[in-house]
Image (cartoon, helix red, strand yellow):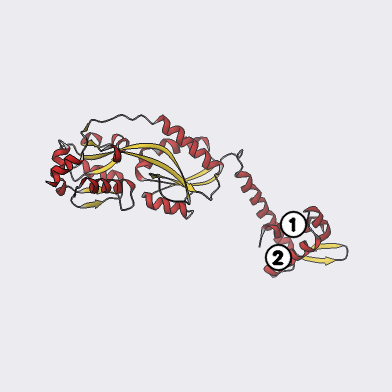
């Protein structure tokens, strides 16, 4: 069943004849007759009583007419909702990394809900890899992920840049000392697929550092609380650490520039339509993140250079 079948059916019902309906929808009468027969065959119901002077709906046709008109009306409404001048409305399914959802997004979502109450917002958190798959499979309309990725199916745009820092307990005095003890340190991280975790692993590999065990935790609060308690170390955006309740119980250590600066990117499927709701979200995110660009810096230690990594290796 196609929309053209429904349009022809409604036209015949309204005009009372195949000929008049064909003229109205700028089609040939034979094509209209054929499509109505296809529709009746698919529904296994006779929709019209053919008479010499026109057509009359059968009881089945009268029932089907209401549904056909509703379907066409919803189609028109959905099309209008996608026009550039349409007010944002409908459903908007977003995804985000746990850290971005905890620190960056609350103000954006609050302002968005206030400005566009007709949009039904939903937010799913996950690792960058999980979010990419969800967008590619159209389970999400868009998502905030870490970094740019090699994917031809995604449209990607930077929304802000984060500074990543190594986070330890407050008792850690220097990175030189930490490097010497790295084999005994527990790395606290989100599950595999987390962009920050993969960045930390890449840094360890390049610097020749072999840490102790990796312990996976499912929440940001869990990771930060364990670090504050001296259980291990982690890698997080500076803004996340500075905004967390345990910030006075941890210490930030600056990373080499090649690992410290990462971009948070908004992704959506290239074959999806940018709805008014989506466009409004992207604009508001850029607006809010520009305002939040400057963050207060906590004191940090010196950068852990490859030279310090060699101290550990020795």
**Is 49 on the left or on the right of 188, as rendered?**
right
Report if residue 17 is visible in the image.
Answer: no
Residue 50, given in percent of the width and then of the height, sits at 82, 66
Residue 82 percent across, percent down from the top left = 60, 44
Residue 230: image quadrant is top left
Q: Label 1: which residue? A: 10
Element marked by disc 2: helix
The answer to which of 148 and 59 lies nearer the viewer is 148
Evaluate if marks 2 and 1 touch, with contact meaning CB atoms under 8 Å apart.
no
Name the residue: 15% across, 41% down.
Answer: 178
Q: Residue 39 shows which numbered tag?
A: 2
Q: Is residue 265 left or right of residue 69?
A: left
The image shows residue 249 at horizontal and vertical percentages of 21, 36
Viewport quadrant of the N terminus: bottom right
Quarter residue 14 falls in: bottom right
| Mark 2 or mark 1: whose residue is earlier in sequence | 1
Task: Say what secondary structure mark 1 lies in.
Answer: helix
Give neighbour class at mark 2: few <14, some 14-19, many 20+ (Cα, 10 Å). Answer: some
Left or right position of 9 against 277:
right
- Depth check: give the residue in front, 309 or 50: 309
Q: Is residue 52 visible?
A: yes
135 vs 252, left or right, is: right
Q: Compared to 281, does 31 lie above or below?
A: below
The image quarter containing residue 298 is: top left
In the image, what residue occupies the spot 47% across and 55% down?
A: 137
As drawn, which residue projects farthest toward the right?
Answer: 53
In percent of width and height, residue 309 lies at: 17, 43
Position of 290 relative to 50 (above/below) = above
Between the C-alphas of marks 2 and 1, the distance is 12 Å
Residue at the image position 83 percent from the left and 56 percent from the top: 20
Nearest the eye: 247 or 264: 264
Which numbered marker is on residue 181? Answer: none
């Amino acid at each position: 069943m196609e929309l053209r079948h429904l349009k022809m059916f409604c036209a015949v019902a309204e005009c009372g004849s195949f000929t008049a309906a064909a003229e109205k929808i700028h089609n040939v009468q034979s094509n209209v007759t054929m499509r109505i027969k296809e529709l009746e065959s698919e529904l296994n119901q006779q929709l019209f009583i053919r008479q010499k002077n026109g057509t009359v709906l059968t009881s089945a046709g009268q029932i089907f007419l209401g549904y056909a008109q509703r379907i066409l009306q919803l189609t028109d409404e959905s099309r209008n909702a996608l026009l550039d001048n349409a007010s944002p409305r409908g459903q908007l399914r977003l995804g985000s990394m746990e850290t971005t959802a905890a620190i960056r997004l609350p103000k954006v979502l609050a302002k968005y809900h206030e400005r566009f109450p007709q949009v039904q917002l939903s937010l799913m958190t996950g690792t960058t890899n999980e979010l990419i798959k969800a967008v590619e499979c159209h389970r999400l309309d868009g998502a905030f992920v870490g970094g740019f990725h090699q994917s031809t199916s995604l449209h990607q745009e930077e929304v802000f840049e984060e500074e990543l820092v190594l986070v330890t307990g407050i008792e850690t005095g220097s990175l030189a000392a930490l490097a010497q003890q790295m084999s005994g340190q527990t790395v606290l991280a989100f599950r595999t697929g987390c962009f920050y975790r993969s960045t930390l692993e890449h840094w360890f590999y390049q610097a020749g550092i072999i840490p102790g065990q990796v312990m996976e935790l499912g929440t940001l609060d869990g990771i930060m609380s364990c670090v504050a308690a001296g259980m291990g170390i982690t890698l997080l955006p500076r803004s996340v650490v500075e905004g967390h309740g345990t910030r006075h119980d941890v210490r930030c250590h600056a990373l080499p520039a090649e690992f410290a600066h990462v971009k948070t990117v908004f992704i959506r499927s290239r074959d999806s339509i940018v709805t008014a709701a989506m466009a409004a979200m992207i604009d508001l995110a850029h607006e809010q993140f520009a305002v939040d660009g400057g963050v207060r810096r906590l004191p940090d230690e010196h950068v852990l250079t490859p030279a310090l990594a060699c101290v550990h290796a020795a």
